[in-house]
Amino acid sequence: MKLLEEIKIGSLKSRNRIIMSPMAMYSAKNGLANDFHFVQYGSRAIGGAGIIVVEATAVEKIGRITPGDLGIYNERQAKRLSKIANFIEKYGAIPGIQLAH
């Protein structure tokens, strides 16, 4: 087993075994992902990570740990996260999300 070899997890196939774990960035406003998030996660995909897990993302406003946490409890938030996920996939990585409540 080698770090840069492909790995299959269920039906997913990652280009390598490098996984970016979720980190608390506290950079969202009103739960919305912004340019910071796009660059943070997109650059890791371009850089070659196999799987990228977005930070704790609240499923309800009341579930956020801080006002700077991401949310996925309305359409605007989902749209912005979708843009990031699509970019991650475009550059060969598997997007993931850590749900929080």
Image (cartoon, grey):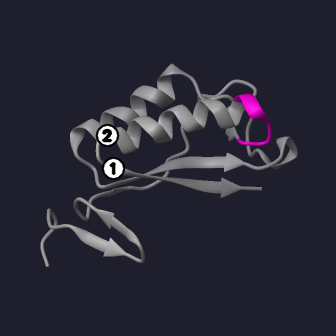
Residue 58 in the image: x percent, y percent?
A: 73, 47
Task: Determine whether the residue tagged by mark 2 lies in a helix, strand or loop.
Answer: helix
Question: What residue appears at the point 70 percent right and 33 percent down from the top-left corner?
Answer: 77
Q: Please name the amino acid that badge 1 sits on.
A: Ala
Residue 94 in the image: x percent, y percent?
A: 39, 54
Q: Please name the amino acid that badge 2 sits on.
A: Arg
Task: Determine whether the residue tagged by mark 1 lies in a helix, strand or loop.
Answer: loop
- Answer left or right for 37 relative to 9: right
Q: Nearer the viewer, residue 41 or 62?
A: 41
Relative to 80, is 61 above or below? below
Residue that numbered label 1 is attached to: 93
Residue that numbered label 2 is attached to: 44
| Label 2 close to label 1 by CB (< 8 Å) | yes
Span highlighted in magenta in the image = 72-76
Q: Nearer the viewer, residue 27 or 89?
A: 89
Q: Quadrant of the N terminus?
A: bottom left
- Determine the residue located farthest toward the right in the rendered image: 62
Q: Quadrant of residue 34?
A: top right
